[in-house]
Every structure is written in structure tokens, then in C-alpha cells.
Image: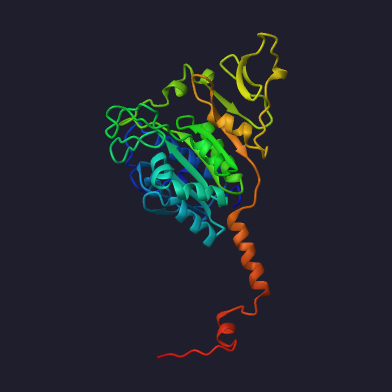
């Protein structure tokens, strides 16, 4: 698309009334995706938005693109089918922590393993919102909800750990209300060939308000999160004087200028390293022991499923004697019609 004809983010807004609760983090994510698509120079007909079930899964109605509101937990399977059937489409899957990691867990991990060229936005508010406040696979241990009135006795999934453990090649994390950074993460995901998982720490104002507040509150966010950038030192904090280094096999938070620590001692982020060891450690960091890692944690090139399928079909067709249906019916077989 030429610069003169490039669409604005408002061109990706449908005429449907957005029916999320006022103050829901989903509004911000919707705006981020629409801005990213405009920045990427997409046309409306280039895009298919696929969702499962949940508050986030209303997303396709609000996008002026192709869309499919599917069934609970099956968004990954259907999005994979859409991409394989029409590889030219930019396929974005919208899902929540319940939709993707509970009923949809099997489809989710196998999509990642296969490395289908999808951009998956995982809204993580640590609750089931649409069905009125049950605990989810990412709810904290001890969380009190309608289905855990005395507190959960389960350990939650860490989406980054699950993604990388399923042999994922791209994982990024951002915060719903940080639109600038969220747009950057969407654009990074779109540029990656293969399955891109973007976990968005999202707030549900009704059933789990301020669940991420310890790290998203403006007064403390710079000291409690770290924005990773490939090729740059892992430095964070309001004063930009804190950093990460390896102490044996473990990550350690240090202060630059104390105990002889210099900026040269701080780890440099390598998102493209094939080895998953450090990426897993970064994805698993939790406050208060560590800052929560934001940004692109892992981005590694690997064979892409839908591209491999397309290549395989071309190779098989090239050596096959049967090129069309006419070849089939004239190849010596007889057909009896009753």
C-alpha cells in the first residue's frame, strides 16, 4: 500500500458499539492493535481476527477486517486452519487466560510447537470475567473467588514459561495501559515469522480489579518492571541504576555503583539466542523478588508450519502425474454411477 493510501487506525474500527465494561483494559488493547495495523500498512482485507470465548473474544466485532468468533478454547485450531488455507492473510488470534490455557490448552501448546505463522494476543487478567468471576489458570495461589471461596490450592501457569516450554520462538509481554509499548510489541510480533505470543497484563475492573497494580502503578512501575531490548543492558529503575547479572546459575538484582558493580557487569539481552535457559529465567521473574520482564523476551527464527505445508504441496504436485481433476478421471480408473 502506498503512503498516500495508507489507512489510519480509525479505518480498522468497525461500526459496532464496543460493549466492554468502562475502564476495562480490553479497550486499550483494541486501540493498540488498530494503531499497530495502521503503522504496519495493512489493508482491511489483509487481516483475519480469530477469537474463542470470553470478554476478549468479542474483539472481531470491533475490527474492520475479516473475523471469526469461534468456540471456547478452539481459537488456535481455527486460526491455524485459516492460515494454512490462505497463507497470504495476516491472522491474529485473540484469547484470554481461561480460553487459551484451560479448555484451549492443548490447541495452544500445539500451535506454538508447530510454529504456525499467527500473532496470538493473550489477555491475562487472572480471572474468568465473562462467566462472572471464577478463578483461572493464571490466578495466584490462595486467590479467593466464586469457585475458590477459601482460596485456590493450585499453582498458576506462567504463560511465558508455558510458551517457551512448548518450543515457542517468540514471546513478548506488555501492559494494557502502556499503549506506546503495546503498539511496539504488536509490531514486533507481526514482523516475526511463526507463532508470536504477546501476553498483555490486563485489568478486569469488575472481578479482579488492580490485580497487576503492584507493577503497573505509575509510582512504582519503573522499579518493579524491566523493559528488555535486544542488544541492550538489562538496566531498570527510576534512576536507571539497577540491573540484572548472573550469580552462578541464578539471576540477581544489583545496584550499579554498589559493591563494585559497574554497568559493564550487567547482562546484555539477547532475544535471538536459540538456547532457552536465560529466556525462561527472564519470563519467570516475579515481583517482589525480581522486576517483571516486559518487551520481547524471545524472538528466534525457525521453520514455519504453514510455509512448510505450502512448500511440501508444491513439491508433491511437481512430481505427481495428476495435476488436475481431468488428469484423475483420465488416468485409467473407471467410475460407476448408480
Query: Is residue 143 left or right of 121 when viewed as pictured?
Result: left
Residue visible at 61% across and 45% down in the picture: 192
Identify which residue, 209 or 100, lies in the foreground. Answer: 100
Residue 23: x percent and y percent? 35, 31
- Could you tell whether 275 is left or right of 62 in the image? right
Whole-percent x, y for residue 57 in the image: 38, 46
Residue situated furthest right in the rendering: 264
The number of numbered discs placed on residues in the rendered structure image is 0
In this view, 223 is above or below 322: above
Residue 52 percent location from the top left of the image: 39, 49
Nearer the observer, 7 or 240: 240
Residue 313 quadrant: bottom right
Using the image as rendered, state which of residue 264 and residue 185 is in the foreground.
264
Residue 221 at least partly seen: yes
Q: How did the renderer colour the structure?
A: rainbow
Residue 33 in the image: x percent, y percent? Answer: 49, 41
Is residue 6 visible to the viewer in this orientation of the structure?
Answer: no
Quadrant of the frame with the C terminus? bottom left
Left or right of 270 on screen, residue 117: left
Residue 291 vs 27, above or below: the answer is above
User: Which residue is pictured at 66% across the width and 32% down the height?
Assistant: 230
Amino acid at each position: 500500500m502506498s503512503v498516500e493510501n495508507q489507512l489510519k487506525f480509525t479505518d480498522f474500527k468497525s461500526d459496532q458499539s464496543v460493549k466492554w465494561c468502562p475502564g476495562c483494559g480490553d479497550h486499550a488493547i483494541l486501540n493498540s492493535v488498530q494503531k499497530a495495523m495502521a503503522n504496519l500498512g495493512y489493508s482491511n482485507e489483509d487481516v483475519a481476527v480469530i477469537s474463542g470465548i470470553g470478554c476478549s473474544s468479542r474483539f472481531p466485532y470491533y475490527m474492520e477486517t475479516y473475523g471469526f468468533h469461534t468456540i471456547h478454547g478452539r481459537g488456535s485450531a481455527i486460526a491455524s486452519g485459516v492460515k494454512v488455507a490462505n497463507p497470504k492473510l495476516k491472522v491474529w488470534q485473540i484469547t484470554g487466560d481461561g480460553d487459551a490455557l484451560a479448555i484451549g490448552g492443548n490447541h495452544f501448546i500445539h500451535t506454538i510447537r508447530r510454529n504456525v505463522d499467527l500473532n496470538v494476543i493473550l489477555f491475562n487478567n487472572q480471572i474468568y470475567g465473562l462467566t462472572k468471576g471464577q478463578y483461572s489458570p493464571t490466578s495466584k495461589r490462595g486467590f479467593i473467588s466464586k469457585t475458590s471461596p477459601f482460596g485456590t490450592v493450585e499453582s498458576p501457569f506462567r504463560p511465558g514459561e508455558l510458551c517457551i516450554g512448548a518450543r515457542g520462538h517468540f514471546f513478548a509481554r506488555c501492559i494494557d495501559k502502556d499503549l506506546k509499548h503495546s503498539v511496539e510489541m504488536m509490531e514486533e510480533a507481526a514482523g516475526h515469522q511463526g507463532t508470536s505470543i504477546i501476553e498483555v497484563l490486563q485489568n478486569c475492573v469488575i472481578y479482579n480489579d488492580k490485580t497487576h497494580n503492584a507493577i503497573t502503578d505509575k509510582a512504582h512501575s519503573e522499579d518493579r518492571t524491566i523493559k528488555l531490548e535486544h542488544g541492550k543492558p538489562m538496566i531498570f529503575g527510576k534512576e536507571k541504576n539497577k540491573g540484572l547479572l548472573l550469580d552462578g546459575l541464578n539471576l540477581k538484582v544489583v545496584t550499579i555503583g554498589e559493591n563494585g558493580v559497574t554497568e559493564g557487569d550487567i547482562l546484555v539481552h539477547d532475544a535471538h539466542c536459540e538456547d532457552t535457559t536465560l529466556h525462561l529465567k527472564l519470563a519467570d521473574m516475579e515481583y517482589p523478588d525480581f522486576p517483571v520482564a516486559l518487551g520481547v523476551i524471545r524472538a528466534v527464527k525457525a521453520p514455519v508450519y504453514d510455509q512448510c505445508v505450502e512448500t511440501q504441496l508444491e513439491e508433491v504436485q511437481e512430481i505427481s502425474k495428476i495435476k488436475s481433476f481431468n488428469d484423475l478421471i483420465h488416468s485409467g480408473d473407471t467410475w460407476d454411477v448408480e
